Image (cartoon, grey):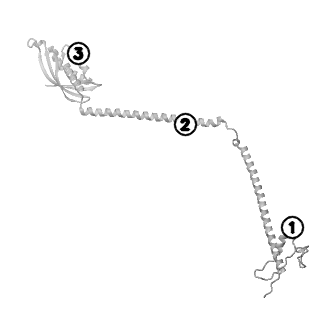
């Protein structure tokens, strides 16, 4: 049966009355690893843990030398962890200080910049708003809007009036044009026909009525109903007939009972008239006491001037 390995003895601290002769020298304890604020029982527990020999899982014997190596490695690890923790704490403290300083500097610079801006631009200094200043632009804008609306309304009204006037004028012109076309298609109206026939009958009767002793009266009547050109030509062309009538001391009375329109337009008309004429003379009174009766036909030409039909031609058709 194999011999079991003796249980390792726990190294004890100096001054322990139960410590064996091979106890660890107090000088081997690193004073830096001792926490001055730790409780004595806590320190004892830590030293016990630090100096506990590592157990070989393989079943090898644990020697005092192996326990010392474990303590040294453990101590080094703790020192490394403590150093890392201190460095991290120092970095956090330094970063916090730097951030605080940066924020304070930025705050100072911002305050200074704001003060400089307010000093350079007095309008940026907070103050109570003046009602007149704020309402002035709004009032002006309101006035401009009202004025613009009025001008727009006036323009629209003027355009509407122009459109209405054009529509009325167009309607009137269209009506007049349609009426003129209808009148042209239908020919002269009955009133115009009656007026033309009546004028032709009166003018023919007036020309065939005269007294050789007073041709001035005939000339006056001719000029009243004729165009100037016709009056001048007719008077000049009848001088030979007037001389013969003057020798016979003749007088004539003419009447027209029948007439008809040959042609007619808005400004011209030709009318055929039938003239009944009675001529008396002292030279033949003993033979024909009632006078000599003549019947003739004549084409009477009329011209319309200023709304009045005037005699512009007279041609006897025997």
Q: Which residue is mark 1?
A: 40
When the figure is inspected, residue 282 is found, relative to residue 94, above or below; the finding is: above
Residue closest to the eye, 254 or 18? 18
How many badges with numbers are in the image? 3
The crowd level at tag 2 (other Cα within 10 Å; few <14, some 14-19, many 20+) is few
Counting residues from the start of the chain, the first of labels 3 and 1 encountered is: 1
Instruction: Give the CA distance from mark 2 to mark 1.
Output: 94 Å
Element type where label 2 sits in the image? helix
Instruction: Give the CA distance from mark 3 to mark 1.
Output: 175 Å
Q: Within the image, what quadrant is residue 3 found in?
A: bottom right
Residue closest to the eye, 64 or 73? 64
Q: Position of residue 125 (x, y in %)?
A: 71, 42
Determine whether label 3 and label 1 are within 8 Å by CB: no
Quadrant containing the C terminus is: top left
Q: Which residue is mark 2?
A: 145
Of badges 3 and 1, nearer the viewer stands 1
In the rendered structure, the answer to whether residue 94 lies left or right of residue 36 reads left
When the figure is inspected, residue 266 is found, relative to residue 59, above or below; the finding is: above
Q: Position of residue 30 (x, y in %)?
A: 87, 72
Instruction: Give the CA distance from mark 2 to mark 3.
Output: 82 Å
Q: Which residue is mark 3?
A: 217
Q: Residue furthest front?
A: 1
């Amino acid at each position: 049966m194999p011999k079991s390995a003796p249980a390792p003895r726990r190294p004890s601290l100096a001054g322990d009355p139960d410590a064996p002769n091979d106890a660890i020298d107090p000088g081997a304890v690193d004073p830096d690893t001792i926490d001055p604020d730790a409780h004595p029982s806590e320190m004892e527990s830590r030293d016990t843990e630090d100096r506990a020999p590592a157990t070989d899982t393989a079943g090898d014997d644990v020697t005092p030398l192996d326990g010392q190596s474990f303590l040294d490695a453990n101590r080094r690890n703790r020192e490394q962890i403590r150093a890392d923790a201190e460095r991290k704490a120092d970095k956090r403290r330094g970063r916090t200080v730097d951030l605080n300083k940066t924020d304070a500097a930025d705050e100072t610079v911002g305050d200074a910049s704001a003060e400089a801006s307010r000093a350079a631009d007095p309008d940026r200094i907070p103050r109570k708003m003046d009602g007149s200043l704020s309402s002035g632009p709004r009032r002006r804008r309101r006035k401009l809007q009202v004025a613009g609306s009025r001008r727009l309304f006036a323009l629209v009204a003027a355009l509407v009036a122009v459109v209405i006037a054009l529509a009325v004028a167009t309607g009137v012109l269209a009506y007049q044009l349609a009426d003129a076309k209808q009148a042209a298609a239908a020919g002269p109206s009955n009133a115009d026909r009656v007026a033309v026939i009546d004028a032709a009958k009166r003018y023919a009767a007036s020309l065939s009525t005269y007294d050789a002793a007073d041709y001035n009266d005939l000339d006056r009547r001719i000029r009243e109903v004729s165009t100037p050109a016709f009056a001048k030509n007719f008077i000049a062309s009848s001088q030979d007939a007037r001389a013969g009538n003057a020798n016979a001391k003749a007088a004539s009375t003419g009447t027209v009972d029948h007439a008809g329109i040959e042609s007619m337009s808005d400004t011209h008309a030709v009318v055929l008239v039938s003239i009944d004429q009675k001529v008396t003379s002292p030279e033949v009174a003993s033979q024909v006491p009632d006078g000599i009766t003549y019947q003739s036909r004549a084409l009477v030409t009329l011209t319309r001037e200023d709304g009045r039909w005037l005699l512009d031609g007279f041609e006897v058709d025997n």
